[in-house]
Image (cartoon, grey):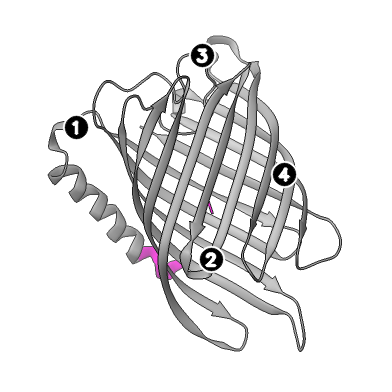
Amino acid sequence: MRGGGNRQGGRLRAGVSVLALLSVFAHPSFSLAQTFEITGGETVFSQNSQYYFGEVGDFFPLGGVPAPSPGGPSAPDVGTAPTGGLTLHLFVVVFYFSYETPGPPMTTLNSYNGLNPGAGIRVPLKNGFWEGDVGIALAQAFQTDTPVESLAGVYLQTEYYQGLGPGAFDFFANYIGYIQYIYGQARYLSPVLETQHKTVTFFLGPELIGQGNNTYNAGQGGAVLGVALPRLHSYLTFDGGLLRSSVSDGWGGYEGFSWYVSF
């Protein structure tokens, strides 16, 4: 999952402190070249599911000079920090995720306040990159008529980005071990409009999403609008479309928003 309540604030601050210490002690020679990232967003499903997230991260080049864009000079911005060469990525994700499980004697509400610290390597490809990350998934789980439960497990994440034709293909996936939850998202974005002096660039394209575990699953398809704002070091994403999940026999919809900043 690419989102928690007030009880997660202390954990988030601790995660930021860990990143800062790693920046100073593990890679002092890279302190001037590192790139910080902050992102957050939400996705709301019409079939009684919702997801909110926030992330702070740091990129350390392990060799070479950062490239001018994530996929090379001819590829559109995918909404991630520009990196070049082999790069270390450290990050902490906080999130809130909830969904309903129908069935006798009643519908059950499942929700999670989660924290995922992780680290990985971004490998440059021709006009693109691949990244693999591993970390720890922690959460407080709430379920109807069930005591609050503390959960822990492995967290895995990957992203593949490739310039293709006039646009670029982006695939993102992750796995949360304590509930065996898999999320996969594929997008193709192409530039459609650019303002004078390139202060704003708009991207448009389709997306497909699959997610779930042994108690809930959903398939989604829709469109994505990306807005690059280089002067603000920002990338906005708006997406929406149709959804069908295991909690209903019919079709529903979904919408999402995210704001990514790197500096």
Instruction: Give the mark, 3 or 4, whose residue is nearer the N terminus.
Output: 3
Query: In the picture shown, does residue 262 fall above or below 145?
Result: above
> Tag 2 or tag 1, which sits nearer the N-term?
1
Q: Secondary structure at mark 3?
A: loop
- The residue singled out by tag 2 in the image is 180
Do the residues under discs 1 and 2 have CB atoms within 8 angstroms?
no
Residue under label 4, please give it.
Answer: 240
The residue that disc 3 covers is 74
Query: Residue 115: horizontal and vertical position, in percent?
Result: 41, 62
Quote the CA–CA distance across marks 1 and 4.
Answer: 39 Å
Q: Dot 2, crowdedness within 10 Å: few (<14), some or many (≥20)?
A: some
Q: Position of residue 197 (x, y in %)?
A: 53, 10
Task: Tell which of 122 and 53 is nearer to you.
Answer: 122
Mark 3 vs mark 4: in front? 3
Q: Residues within 10 Å of mark 1 (few under 14, many from 20)?
A: some
Residue 143 picture quarter: bottom right
Query: Mark 3 or 2 closer to N-term?
Result: 3
User: Which callout, 2 or 4, points at the residue further toward the start of the chain?
Assistant: 2
Tell me whether the residue at label 3 lies in contact with that at label 2, contact meaning CB atoms closer than 8 angstroms.
no
At label 3, the amino acid type is Ser
Farthest right residue?
250
The stretch of residues the image draws in magenta is 1-9
Residue furthest to the top: 197
| Mark 1: amino acid | Phe
Structural crowding at the residue carrying mark 4, measured as other residues with C-alpha within 10 Å and reported as few (<14), some (14–19) or many (≥20) = many
Name which quarter of the figure residue 212 lies in: bottom right
Secondary element under disc 2, as helix, strand or loop, is loop
The residue beneath circle 1 is 30
